[in-house]
Image: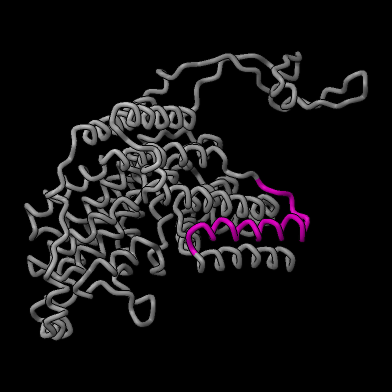
């Protein structure tokens, strides 16, 4: 037991140090923890999450190419028109805009252009910018569990199917989208009268007495409406949306997917010893394409959705490059592609480290948690949330913790219901979107508090995740 605790501390220390450095360090420093466990304690290495990583690379490449074509500018422009048309409702409309942008693109990093616009509209309407900005930043991350190409959703489906819970991407979205929208609207309602109005806020009014501060706050207005969007950029968006539609169609109607001949190992087959004395397993025979009676069999296999997503996304990216004037070099330099690659490294290191630890202590954990999980299966949501606070990636939480949840015997329906709880990294305000939002708010009302945890994202984040998880849990139970 003492050794188990020491090794757990190694895992937690690696995650903590990585989170302090941020960006690529989270995944890279997890590699140090992995090295200590494997070389120092002699633990058997876990399995790196290659399937999820390949999907992220394909999806981020497609979204990055769309951004390089100018398509993202068009989406932002559409959102800005909606917000400026109804400025008095910005506290509700801003989070809806950031939410659906994330749903479409699969990453919350697309909102940086929209945040200054949200702040500008709020200021000109006399609305405290903290109200829409705080919940809009939360919404940009909540949308990840509602995107058909986000790593968290794809990983949930892939891992669930591997653990005999038959679920598709559309079925996940039927739960996560309405649940998260309920959570966001609850958070927006709580934020509607949050803090003092600007004309009654003594701190803000004191700033306006300084001519330089007044000019800084009101002197410039962020907008994308003066930007001319070429038809090629609009075509790139249409290609991207078409790719999403194809993915959802195949996920909803798997009978449309092609099948192919494959050799696979027969379940529970033993090893085959050759005359030479060499022992070959059934899996080795199947991998080599050799059919041996009683050990392997030849049959038809359906194309898997993780392969479908990769093929469709990469093909869509190619079409944008060929027909929409998207420059590959510009895509690689863009924030969407770069943030996606950071997520790949984070998931790679974190998930591999977690799988190594949990796979070596699965029996002990099942014995220790069996009673709690059996009595309160929903309590796994608290574990998901706590882990997310540490590792700043919903995809990494799903990849690292979902296999453990299934091995603990938690039903897939319950896990679907608590999926929104994998977002907890608003708790400590060190995530790029939160920090950027604070900097975009020229009024200074969106803040990171003196005591770190009393920040502008805490209240909307807790309300949104709590309500979303409760509603998702109820919807999953009803669907079942």
25 in magenta:
yes
Q: Is residue 437 magenta?
A: no
Q: Who's the residue at 74% across and 26% down the image?
A: 284
Q: Which quadrant of the figure has residue 3?
A: bottom right
The residue positioned 68% from the left and 16% from the top of the image is: 297
Query: Residue at (54%, 37%) from the top-left corner?
Result: 51
Relative to 432, is 407 on the left or the right? right
Q: Closest to the observer: 145 or 342? A: 342
Q: Is residue 290 above or below residue 20?
A: above
- Residue at position x 31%, y 44% from top? 103
Image coords of residue 339 (percent x, y): 42, 51
Judge by depth and name the residue closer to the eye, 423 or 61: 61
| Left or right side of 270 for 204 | left
Provide the residue span drawn in magenta.
Answer: 22-46
Q: From this viewpoint, is residue 480 visible?
A: no
The answer, for residue 237, to whether it is visible in the render is: yes
Q: Main secondary structure of the magenta part?
A: helix
């Amino acid at each position: 037991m003492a050794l188990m605790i020491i090794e757990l501390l190694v895992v937690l220390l690696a995650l903590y140090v990585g989170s302090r450095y941020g960006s690529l360090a989270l995944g890279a420093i997890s590699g140090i923890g992995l090295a200590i466990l494997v070389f120092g304690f002699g633990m058997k290495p876990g399995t790196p999450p290659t399937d999820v990583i390949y999907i992220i690379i394909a999806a981020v490449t497609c979204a990055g190419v769309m951004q390089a074509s100018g398509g993202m500018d068009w989406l932002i422009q559409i959102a800005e028109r909606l917000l400026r048309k109804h400025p008095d409702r910005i506290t509700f409309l801003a989070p809806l805009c950031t939410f659906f942008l994330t749903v479409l693109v699969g990453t919350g990093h697309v909102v940086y252009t929209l945040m200054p616009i949200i702040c500008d509209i709020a200021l000109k309407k006399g609305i405290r910018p903290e109200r829409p900005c705080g919940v809009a930043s939360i919404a940009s991350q909540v949308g990840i569990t509602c995107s058909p190409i986000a790593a968290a959703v794809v990983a949930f489906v892939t891992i669930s199917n591997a653990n005999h819970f038959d679920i598709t991407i559309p079925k996940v979205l039927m739960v996560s989208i309405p649940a998260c929208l309920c959570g966001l609207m609850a958070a927006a309602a709580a934020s509607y009268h949050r803090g003092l109005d600007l004309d009654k806020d003594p701190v803000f009014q004191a700033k306006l007495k300084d001519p330089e501060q007044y000019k800084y706050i009101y002197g410039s207005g962020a907008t994308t409406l003066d930007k001319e969007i070429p038809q090629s950029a609009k075509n790139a968006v249409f290609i991207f949306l078409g790719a999403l539609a194809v993915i959802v169609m195949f996920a909803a109607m798997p009978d449309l997917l092609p099948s192919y001949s494959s050799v696979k190992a027969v379940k529970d087959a033993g090893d085959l010893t050759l005359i030479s004395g060499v022992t070959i397993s059934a899996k080795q025979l199947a991998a080599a394409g050799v059919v041996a009676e009683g050990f392997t069999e030849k049959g038809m296999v359906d194309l898997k959705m993780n392969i479908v997503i990769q093929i469709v996304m990469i093909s869509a990216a190619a079409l944008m490059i060929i027909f929409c004037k998207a420059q590959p070099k510009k895509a690689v330099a863009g924030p969407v592609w770069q943030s996606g690659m950071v997520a790949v490294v984070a998931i790679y290191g974190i998930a591999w480290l977690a799988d190594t630890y949990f796979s070596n202590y699965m029996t002990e954990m099942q014995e220790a948690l069996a009673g709690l999980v059996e009595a309160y299966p929903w309590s796994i949501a608290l574990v998901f949330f706590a882990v997310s606070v540490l590792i700043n990636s919903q995809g990494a939480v799903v990849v690292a913790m979902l296999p453990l949840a299934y091995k603990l015997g938690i039903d897939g329906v319950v896990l679907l219901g608590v999926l929104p709880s994998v977002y907890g990294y608003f708790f400590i305000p060190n995530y790029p979107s939160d920090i950027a939002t604070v900097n975009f708010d020229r009024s200074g009302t969106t803040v990171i508090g003196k005591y770190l945890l009393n920040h502008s994202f805490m209240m909307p984040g807790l309300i949104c995740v709590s309500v979303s998880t409760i509603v998702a849990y109820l919807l999953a139970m009803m669907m079942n």
